[in-house]
Amino acid sequence: MLKSPQNRADNISQMPGILTSETVSVAVAVPIAGAYDYLQPTGTLQAAVAGQSAAGISRGTIVTVPFGGRLVTGIVMGAGAGGVAPEKLKAIHAVAPVPTLNEAFISFIDRVAAWTLAPIGAVAKMVLSQPQALQRPPQTTLFTPAKVMPDGIRITPARQQVLDVLGDAGAMTAAELARMANVGSGVISAMAKADMLTGMQVSADRPPPPPQTDRPSLTLTDEQKAAADIMVAACGTGFHSFLLDGVTGSGKTEVYFEAVKAALDAGQQVLILLPEIALSSGWRSRFERRFGVAPVEWHSDIGNSQKRKAWRYVLSGEAKLVVGARSALFLPFANLGLIIVDEEHEHAYKQEDQTIYQARDMAVVRAHIQKCPIILASATPSLESWVNAGKTGETPRYQHIGLPNRIKGAALPAMTAIDLRQTPPERGRWLAPPLVEAIAARLAAGEQSLLFLNRRGYAPLTLCGSCGHKLVCPNCDSWMVAHKLSGQLRCHHCGHRTRPSNHCSACGQDDTMQACGPGVERLAEEVLWRFPDARFAVLSSDTVGTPKAADAFIQSVIEGDVDIIIGTQMVAKGHHFPNLTLVGVVDADLGLAGGDLRAAERTFQMLSQVAGRAGRESRPGEAMLQTLDPENQVLTCLLEGQRDAFLAMEAHARSLAGMPPFGQLAALILSSHDEKRLHATLRRLDQSRPHFTGVDIFGPAIAPIGFLKGRHRGRLLIRTDRSVDIQGILRDWLANFKPDTGVKLQIDIDPYNFL
Ligand code: ADP
Ligand code: ZN
């Protein structure tokens, strides 16, 4: 006997705000689409759709609508905008069997679209990224004993066992029941057939186990406790934003876990954003130790079935805690009570393709709309957050909470510069004598060293020693990078690959091609040559391609299988290597070149992070920076541990130039396979430029990488004072501007990438 389908969605009490208008506005999940009006479903259709109650459609209802000859999903944003005669409109096709998105979330979707100037359909597409989550989940049958046992039924011992098990445990699947009662599955089906058991259809998915908040935690230091208390007190009292500013190894994670516990204890959901695509095993095991369960994860490395479940349980409120990459910000939390953005300064929070957004900034917007606290954590805060914390004399918008000391009293690493002009390495080598000596001393003491060079592959450039011809990518304005391990030349922009040859295609000579400059693979060669007995390993996205492999690598370092680690920025992040006492930065000047607004800031952050890997436990650490320019102010601040002075200097420079965060920037990027059309569009865009006070428009110019992935590119940069409505200006300007066919226009509000 099967009861009518019971599904969570059926039981959702209807939210207030049923739309009674004849038409509703739907944000269809199509990247280039706006919102469109649709007719409300008719009475009969509505009753028939997907088990939804017939009470009506409200803002936040997820629907399927006909669009461009197919059915697409969309989100009801409100009453129809009007302007089109109702008889010309199509009707909503179906309502998805899931709860309605809440008002705060719908407002958030609106705000993201308004801020990024992305079409609302592009934002809807990010929200509805899991179409399978909108279907009825796979079903299973749970059995309970019949309320009234049918007459004349024989209760065999086996049947009695089944009833006893159910008496203790409530509803179960046939398989569970057979196992627990230790009977054959035939017994269960016979009992169901005889109406001794009642079957009930439910979702086969099981909600994730809730985090346990009553487990023992580490005893916080006084400093940690003071910080935690402030944030815990803010939970449940509306919007608060905190900048948790703690040196590497100060125990920030343990501190924000206390706020997580407070929000969970109040029955709310928590979102933790991390910049990495996948969780490090260190973070995961710390979470599991603290909360007794695995967190619900959301990033590109988890499978669709896991994502489908996560999405649904976030919406039903049963997934209490989600740890994810930036896209987790677009999950439909039912009852969000706290957001944490760890490593808030990381540029990985900026999404650069499709809808361009800065997840850290949008997280603050979401917390504000949701009226919940948000914690931005970092050892090297972004200048934006530093200014927002009132550190440059502005009115504070974030509360600054400092953790200036390392746990266990470990000192921060001593930093020194190696002046490459005075003590250069031998020709064709990259490690200078002082660094080589320091590594040798660590080897003798049984301690680990880390060599940091943010360059994948063997050599960034290959050229002909005879004619000077450089190997460049056919699709991009960039050099082909030599990769010796894989025996290839690769473009790091578009992924183009070729086989190396010793023959110069320009002058025709043989054996003239030379590798110039070092990448991590070339450093490994030098390490092998200098320290043939040392165990070394290279960590870059080429050598460890998957998060699992990266984890295994980190674990082997922690277990002491490696003496010298050679790595790109992958090693700079959050890892805790107890036995690592020396960090050598092979080229501290590398990130400072170029016209990037945040080059100095990024270099400072990256080098602080990588230096922070040294000496995190009892043995003191040391960081050595190889440079051709030790007087450079970025490096002097770093060497003297003057982080705040660096931020002040950087703030001053940006403020003078009216650059973010003291002014606003936006980039308009035009690209096309067809160079002529690109230039025609650029010219038209330039001619239509508006003129306002407090607004500067630079360009149009060919982009620094004028040819990328086979597309020609040009850009305009718009700078405005802070008081100017930059989105308003762009909206008006571009409302009537249509690029030539085959030319793509992208808007990047607050660009991080100046390529
Ligand atoms: P951060 O994120 O600030 O660099 P972590 O939160 O990673 O620091 O903490 C660094 C290390 O110190 C971790 O191994 C963590 O488990 C440990 N730790 C943090 N707080 C405490 C504490 N109160 N007592 C003991 N160990 C702690
Ligand atoms: Zn390329």
Image (tube, helix red, strand yellow):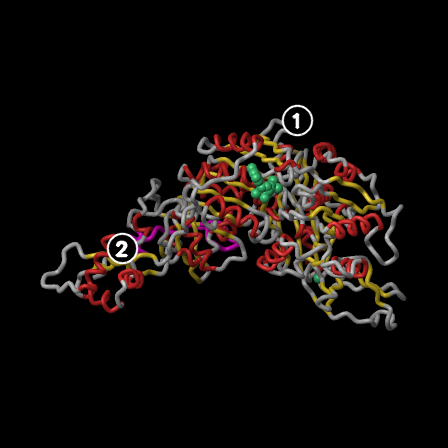
For badge 1, the amino acid type reads Gly
Quadrant location of the N terminus in the rendered image: bottom left
What's the distance in space between the residues labelled 1 and 2, CA to CA? 62 Å
In the image, residue 116 lies at what x, y percent? 57, 45
Q: At numbered mark 2, what does the secondary structure look like: helix, strand or loop?
A: loop
Residue 598 shows up from this direction: no
In the image, residue 251 lies at what x, y percent? 58, 39
Outermost residue to the left: 152
The answer to whether residue 38 is magenta is yes
598 with respect to 8 (left or right): right
Residue linked to disc 2: 171
Query: What's drawn in magenta, residue-wise?
Result: 27-52
Name the residue rendered at 39%, 46% in the picture. Answer: 317
Q: Nearer the viewer, residue 387 or 537?
A: 537
Residue 309 shows up from this direction: yes
Q: Is mark 2 within 8 Å of ligand 1?
A: no
For badge 2, the amino acid type reads Ala
Task: Decide: few, some or many residues near mark 1? Use Cα within 10 Å; few <14, some 14-19, many ≥20.
Answer: few
On residue 393, the disc is 1
Position of residue 583 relative to residue 512, above or below, is above
Q: At numbered mark 1, what does the secondary structure look like: helix, strand or loop?
A: loop
318 with respect to 53 (left or right): right
In the image, residue 284 lies at what x, y percent? 53, 50
In primary-sequence order, the first of circles 1 and 2 is 2
Q: Nearer the viewer, residue 402 or 350?
A: 402
